[in-house]
Image (cartoon, rainbow, N blue to C red):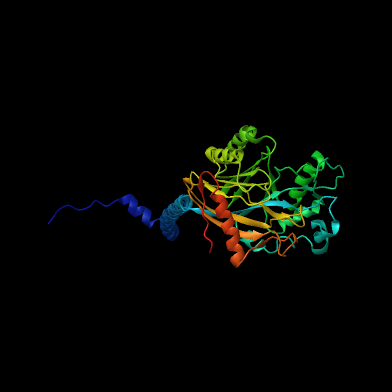
Amino acid sequence: MSSFSKKPNKKREFYKKSKFYKENRKKWLLLGELCVIALLLLCVALISLNSHSTSKKAVSSENIQRAENASDLKDAERKNSSKNPLRLVISTVGDCTLGTDENFDYSTSLNSVYESNGKEYFFQNVRSVFEKDDLTIANAEGTFTTSTSREDKLFAFKADPEYAQIFSSSSVEAVTLANNHSHDYGEQSYEDTKTALDSAGVTHFGYDETAVLEIKGVKVGLVGIYELSDHMERTTQLKENIAKVKKDGAQLIITVFHWGTEKEISPDSNQTQLGRMAIDEGADLVVGHHPHVLQGIEKYKGKYIVYSLGNFCFGGNSYPSDMDTMIFQQTFTIDSSGVQPDGQIHVIPCSISSASGYNNYQPTPAQGSEAERILTKINERSQLIEGEGVILPLTE
């Protein structure tokens, strides 16, 4: 057993017995308890704050991850959409003279029919075809003007500017003006025609004016060449215009020519040279008109040249000798590598009139034996081309 004993602290013992200590002891104990409680609360607050911060960081990290995942998903969708092919259906038709010559009998003119039946009459039998495609292109051969300054020529066509709505009311989205009747009432009538088409919401192109339309995200370039006066001298203009739409981002290029000789069923050497040159320069489809009759179709380097689409909605003659025409359609497939070769074509044989024996200015799809007759005619004329003529099926 230890002999050590703690030495009493006399000062501490005296202090505990003092009056001051006795009076304040309870207060100090309470104060001490409060300090302990405060310290405990501070610890709890610090723990909670740290936990919240950790949780917030976790949520923030999760949000960042979600954003990154969404961005990755969008990138993947973009890549997939660029890989997935798009398909565009393009319809083309020939001469649309939506007016009359002032020397014609007005009672049988297209203008008289317009006054009686309105703008939607003319394409009502083919409107469903045009509405289902992605782009319809026609040749607007005439002027939409109120000018009276007629050019000194055998035939000059005009109609009021409101007639441009015949196109827009029937889903014809683009027209070429590169033809021999777009200036029938002088330069002012050409400008009036463009203004009327703009007001109707119809794209126009031709000569040195090109157009690029964006359809389903694909840029389609339109080039229109008037060949009749200059023939092969149009070579430079053709090359420059195709280069222009390429520069403007065109992924699919359609070149439209006004060329050839009236009533000739075969293309001449100017047509074949220019048509093939257009494809060599980058055109994906070439179509033409002016002969007022159908000509054959050629396949050149996997692409198509339709040498003459004939008349279509034609106010230039109430009793033409040949009323056969067609709608030429091609379905183009476009993917990240460009336009795929050998698109699907579809020829719809038509008459320029829904009546028999005269032109009532209402192009109408042919049926049965009449459709086969027109397709046979196109096939026969395709075989006259010195190249790879296209043989069309006679039935659907």
Percent x, y of residue 337: 46, 45
Percent x, y of residue 344: 51, 55
Percent x, y of residue 35: 43, 56
> Which residue appears at 57% of the width and 58% of the height?
375
348 vs 143, nearest the viewer: 348
Extreme left residue here? Answer: 1
Q: Quadrant of the N terminus?
A: bottom left
User: Residue 19: in sight, yes or no?
Assistant: no
Extreme bottom residue here? Answer: 368
User: Residue 175: in sight, yes or no?
Assistant: yes
> Which residue appears at 29% of the width and 51% of the height?
9
Percent x, y of residue 141: 73, 48
Extreme right residue here? Answer: 148
Q: Give the total of numbered labels.
A: 0
Picture layout, residue 59 above or below residue 280: below
193 vs 72, nearest the viewer: 193
Picture layout, residue 220 above or below residue 118: above
